[in-house]
Amino acid sequence: MIERIIVYTLVSGGVYALLAVGFSLIFGVARIINLAHTAFYMLAAYLILTFASSLGLPLVLSVILSIVAVTIIGVFSYKLVIDPVRGHETTILIVTIALAIVIQEAMLIGYGGGFRGVPSLISGYTKILGTKVLYQQILTFGVVLIILLGTWALLMKTRLGIAIRSTAQDREVANLMGINVARTGMITMAISVALAAIAGALVAPLQVLGPHMWMHPLVMILAVVVLGGLGSIKGSLLGAFILGFAETLVVVLVPTGAHLKGAVALGIMLVVILIRPEGLFGVSFEEER
């Protein structure tokens, strides 16, 4: 049972980490709370289904095309509906949740309300310490690890990363230093949506697809970023695995109460808010910036 908990925690925590890091990035740079973030995650999964099943393209090519397509759609959405109201926080919340509902309704119209499935990139399984582990789960964790390391290298070792971190620290000073903050914001949005699309592509073979599949991950990443500290990449990573572990415990130890996993995550979030409102790394992240 312990081995099963570890495997599921690594997979679910890794996916939540990808989503939460992307969510935190765009908040840090543009101060945008993008409630449509997980709708892009869902869109990527459905596009894989379209490319692979409807058009008959190879599965790997379908995954690549879906990630590229969702990233382009995300950038256009940013320029058309989010950036014009970027200075109005309440309006951004309304606009992004409206965008998520538009994507949801588009999936309902295009695919109906039934559940769909996407074949695994790698079929089969192995046993680790007596626990059955799907090759798709191993692939998911491996890709998550590579993408997270790549994101860290991008932010810490490149000029673009310096521009992103500088803009996150102070947009006005970054602009005075010659950084194109508008372009940096758009590029950050592209990275954020791409991370969501990759998460959707990885999860698609591991769960059934439905037009409401974006809602639970949204609740989870909101809990993750509040737990870790809104805008903190380090906090998002830690928070993702903490809540992934909590969710896995509920599912494994209380199978009949698996529907309570979201409530447990929100309960942890509320406790953290009461004890430490800025989150686990809110203060230290501000000092780093």
Image (spheres, rainbow, N blue to C red):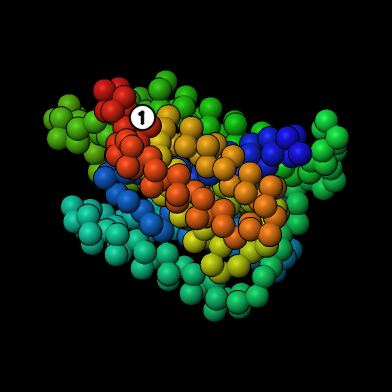
Q: In this view, does 71 lie above or below 52?
A: above
Identify the residue at horizontal 54%, vertical 36% (top origin).
241
Identify the residue at horizontal 26%, vertical 54% (top origin).
83
> Residue 166 lies in what quarter of the image?
top left
The reply, left or right, for residue 111 in relation to residue 272 is right
- Quadrant of the frame with the N terminus: top right
**Circle 1 Cα neighbour tier, 10 Å, few/some/many (<14 / 14–19 / ≥20):** many
The reply, left or right, for residue 141 in relation to residue 39 is right
Q: Is residue 262 above or below residue 124?
A: below
Identify the residue at horizontal 32%, vertical 27% (top origin).
285
Question: How far across and down, in percent of the image, does residue 223 sit?
Answer: 43, 47
* Foreground pick, 278 / 16: 278
Q: In this view, does 43 lie above or below 266?
A: below
Question: How far across and down, in percent of the image, does residue 196 sit?
Answer: 50, 48
Identify the residue at horizontal 61%, vertical 78% (top origin).
112
The reply, left or right, for residue 52 in relation to residue 42 is right
Question: How far across and down, in percent of the image, does residue 28 sit?
Answer: 31, 39
* Foreground pick, 2 / 60: 2
Q: Is residue 145 visible?
A: yes
The residue labelled by disc 1 is 281
> Residue 11 lies in what quarter of the image?
top right
Q: Can residue 11 be seen in this view?
A: no
* Foreground pick, 251 / 137: 251
Q: How many marks?
A: 1
Question: How far across and down, in percent of the image, does residue 187 sit?
Answer: 37, 42
> Residue 245 lies in what quarter of the image?
top right
- Quadrant of the frame with the C terminus: top left
Q: Is mark 1 on a helix, strand or loop?
A: loop
Instruction: Kindly identify the amino acid type of the residue bearing the numbered disc 1.
Output: Phe
